C-alpha cells in the first residue's frame, strides 16, 4: 500500500506527496474552471497517469520479449465533457513506436495497453480512441 498525502496550499493549488519517497507534485485549477493553469490540473495528472501506466506495462512486456521500447511515446488529448457533471469524457491516445517495429509487434503492445491498471480503472463512459503513428 502506498500513501499519498495531499494538502491544499491555497490559491487553487494542491501539493501531493508520495510518502515512501517524499517527492511532490503540484496541481492547479485550469483556466477553463476558474483557475490560473500554472501547472498540471488534477485531470491532467489523470491523463498522465494513463499514459505512464500504459508505457510502463508495454515496457515491461518489451523487456520480457527482448525488444527495445526506448523512445516510444504517447501523446494524450484529454477532452472534458461539455455537459455537467464536469468530468473527463474522452482520451485520444496517439502512440508512436520506435522505428522498425513490425505491425505484429505493435498489435501485441497495443493489446498490453488494456492490461494497464489505470485503463482498467477508467469509468466505462470514458471514451478511448487509439491512433498509431
Image (cartoon, grey):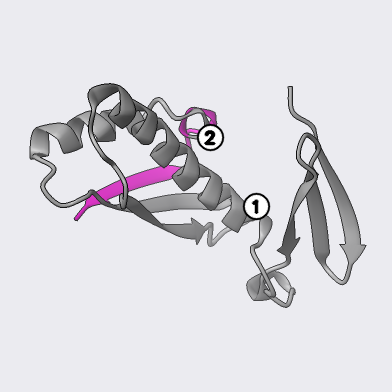
Residue 6 visible, this angle: yes
Q: Position of residue 71 (x, y in %)?
A: 31, 52
Q: Is residue 23 magenta?
A: no
Q: Is residue 96 left or right of residue 104?
A: right
C-alpha span from label 2 to label 1: 14 Å
Q: Secondary structure at mark 2?
A: loop
Q: Quadrant for the N terminus, please.
A: top right
Residue 20 got which mark? none
Q: Residues within 10 Å of mark 1 (few under 14, many from 20)?
A: few
Q: Position of residue 39 (x, y in %)?
A: 67, 69
Q: Residue at x 65, y 52 (%)?
A: 85
Q: Secondary structure at mark 1?
A: loop
Q: Which residues are magenta?
A: 119-133
Residue 93 visible, this angle: no
Image quadrant assignment for residue 75: bottom left
Q: Nearer the viewer, residue 118 or 122?
A: 118
Q: Residue at x 67, y 74 (%)?
A: 37
Q: In this rendering, is residue 20 above or below 24?
A: above
**Which residue matches tag 2?**
123
Q: Nearer the viewer, residue 67 or 90?
A: 67
Q: Position of residue 24 (x, y in %)?
A: 76, 52
Q: In this rendering, is residue 105 above or below 84?
A: above
Q: Quadrant for the C terminus, please.
A: bottom left
* Tag 2 near tag 1, CB within 8 Å: no
Image quadrant assignment for residue 21: top right
**Which residue matches tag 1?**
85
Amino acid at each position: 500500500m502506498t500513501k499519498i498525502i495531499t494538502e491544499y496550499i491555497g490559491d487553487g493549488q494542491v501539493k501531493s506527496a508520495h510518502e515512501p519517497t517524499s517527492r511532490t507534485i503540484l496541481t492547479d485549477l485550469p483556466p477553463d474552471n476558474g483557475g490560473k493553469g500554472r501547472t498540471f490540473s488534477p485531470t491532467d495528472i489523470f491523463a498522465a497517469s494513463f499514459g505512464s501506466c500504459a508505457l510502463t506495462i508495454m515496457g515491461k512486456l518489451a523487456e520480457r520479449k527482448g525488444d527495445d521500447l526506448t523512445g516510444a511515446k504517447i501523446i494524450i488529448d484529454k477532452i472534458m465533457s461539455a455537459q455537467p457533471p464536469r468530468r473527463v469524457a474522452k482520451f485520444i491516445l496517439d502512440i508512436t513506436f520506435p522505428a522498425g517495429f513490425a505491425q505484429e509487434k505493435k498489435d501485441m503492445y497495443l493489446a498490453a495497453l488494456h492490461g494497464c491498471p489505470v485503463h482498467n480503472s477508467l469509468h466505462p463512459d470514458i471514451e478511448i480512441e487509439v491512433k498509431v503513428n
